[in-house]
Image: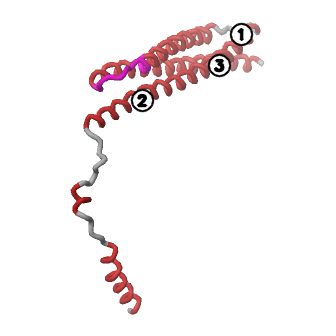
Amino acid sequence: MKKHFLLALTILFAVPSLVSATSAENVTKRRPDKPETAQIQEIRQERRNNVAENHANRLEKRFAFYHSRLSNIMTRFQARLDLLQKEGKNISISQVKLDAAKAKLADAKVKGDAAIAAFKAIGPAKFSEQKTEVFAARDLANSARKLFLETHELLKLALKELKNITRTVQEVL
């Protein structure tokens, strides 16, 4: 009971001392450093320009990674197919799918480079003027991404065929 009484007294005397009055001058001028709307528009526009440039840099890194990774896989895959061909195995189906994957990868690289160039070409303008450029660049990037995915799918199909070839070799042994 004494604890509750002491707590109530502490709250009763401490809380009013925490509240302080503010001067009328401070109340009328809450944010004297608030930027004007023209400055706000300029800041927003600068951020939009930086967003497009940053996005282009991220796309460049991502597409370069995809291209190098898939081309390394294709190189190893081709080496494996060459070994099987030297052994006298029929690799035609797998080779056709690998060639199609190489063609898709080349298309994806071209589309990716075009998308990166489109994002880097977005100049400082009002957002309404940039909107169509941004959407066109986005569509290019999406189509490049889809081509990279299709390349990956073709590689998986070629790998299945390679497994079938090696499986028949192992069954014979």
Q: How far is the residue under mark 2 from the one under mark 1?
A: 48 Å
Say what amino acid the circle numbered 3 marks: Asn
Image quarter (top left, top right, bottom left or bottom right) of the C terminus: top right
The residue singled out by tag 2 in the image is: 50
Q: Quadrant of residue 72?
A: top right
Q: Which mark is residue 108?
A: none
The kind of residue tagged 2 is Asn
SS at mark 2 in the image: helix
* Residue toward you, 51 or 84: 51
Q: Quadrant of residue 74?
A: top right
Residue 120 magenta: yes
Q: How many other residues sit within 10 Å of disc 3, few (<14), some (14-19) or many (≥20)?
A: few
Asked if marks 3 and 2 touch (Cβ < 8 Å), the reply is: no
Instruction: Residue at 25%, 64% (x, y): give it.
Output: 23
- Magenta stretch containing residue 71, yes or no? no
Of badges 3 and 2, the one in the foreground is: 2
Q: Which mark is residue 72?
A: 3
Residue behind mark 1: 82
The stretch in magenta equals 118-127
Q: Position of residue 60 (x, y in %)?
A: 52, 22
Main SS category, magenta section:
loop
Horizontal side of residue 41 vs 116, given as left or right = left
Which residue occupies 67% across, 15% down?
75
Gap between marks 3 and 1, in whole Å?
Answer: 15 Å
Residue 34: percent from left, percent from top: 29, 45
Quadrant showing the N terminus? bottom left
Position of residue 125 in the picture relative to residue 108 (left or right): left
Which mark sits nearer the N-terminus, 3 or 1? 3
The residue that appears at 53% across and 22% down in the rendered structure is 63
Kind of element beneath mark 1 = helix
> What secondary structure is found at the residue carrying circle 3?
helix
